[in-house]
Image (cartoon, rainbow, N blue to C red):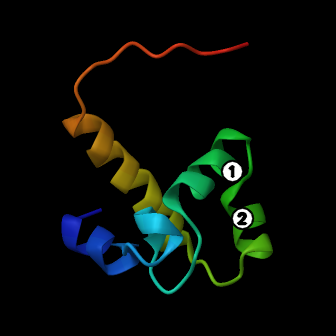
């Protein structure tokens, strides 16, 4: 996915969810989509439960996260069990 495709689907607006990255025109955060995917929700289930989303929105959320992580500096993360 290109940066322009991400820009078409993802927005950061301080007045929406305190500036978290969301799918444009919704209050659905990129973080929330990633959480659903991490909890083994298939694309189809996400789309059924959130009909305002398109598959391209989910892919944009994944790609946005990939870009953020690429630019991030390494910091050890403690995972609580």
Relative placement, left or right, of 49 versus 22 is right
- In the image, residue 73 sits, relative to residue 49, either above or below, namely above
What count of labels does the image hold?
A: 2
Quadrant where the C terminus lies?
Answer: top right
Give coordinates of residue 40: x percent, y percent: 73, 42
- In the image, residue 78 sits, relative to residue 21, either above or below, namely above
Give coordinates of residue 53: x percent, y percent: 60, 78
Quadrant where the N terminus lies?
Answer: bottom left
Residue 74: mark? none
Relative placement, left or right, of 39 versus 31 is right
Please say if the residues under marks 2 and 1 sit with CB atoms less than 8 Å apart: yes
Relative placement, left or right, of 58 versus 1 is right
- In the image, residue 13 sits, relative to residue 72, either above or below, namely below
Residue at mark 2 to residue at mark 1: CA–CA distance: 8 Å
| Residue under the point 22% across and 26% down | 73
- In the image, residue 17 sits, relative to residue 69, either above or below, namely below
| Residue under the point 61% across and 55% down | 32
> Label 1, on which residue?
36
Q: Nearer the viewer, residue 81 or 19?
A: 19
Give coordinates of residue 71: x percent, y percent: 20, 38
> Label 2, on which residue?
46
> Counting other residues with Cα less than 10 Å from the Cα at mark 1, is it few (<14), some (14-19), or many (20 or more)?
some
Local secondary structure at mark 1 = helix
| Residue under the point 36% across and 53% down | 63
| Residue under the point 39% across and 76% down | 9
Q: Earlier in the sequence, mark 2 or mark 1?
A: 1
Give coordinates of residue 62: x percent, y percent: 45, 52
> Counting other residues with Cα less than 10 Å from the Cα at mark 2, is it few (<14), some (14-19), or many (20 or more)?
some
């Amino acid at each position: 996915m290109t940066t322009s495709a991400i820009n078409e689907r993802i927005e950061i607006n301080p007045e929406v969810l305190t500036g978290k990255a969301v799918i444009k025109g919704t209050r659905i955060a990129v973080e929330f989509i990633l959480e659903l995917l991490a909890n083994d929700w298939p694309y189809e289930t996400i789309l059924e439960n959130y009909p305002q989303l398109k598959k391209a929105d989910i892919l944009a959320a994944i790609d946005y996260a990939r870009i953020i992580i690429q630019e991030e500096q390494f910091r050890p993360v403690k995972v609580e069990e």
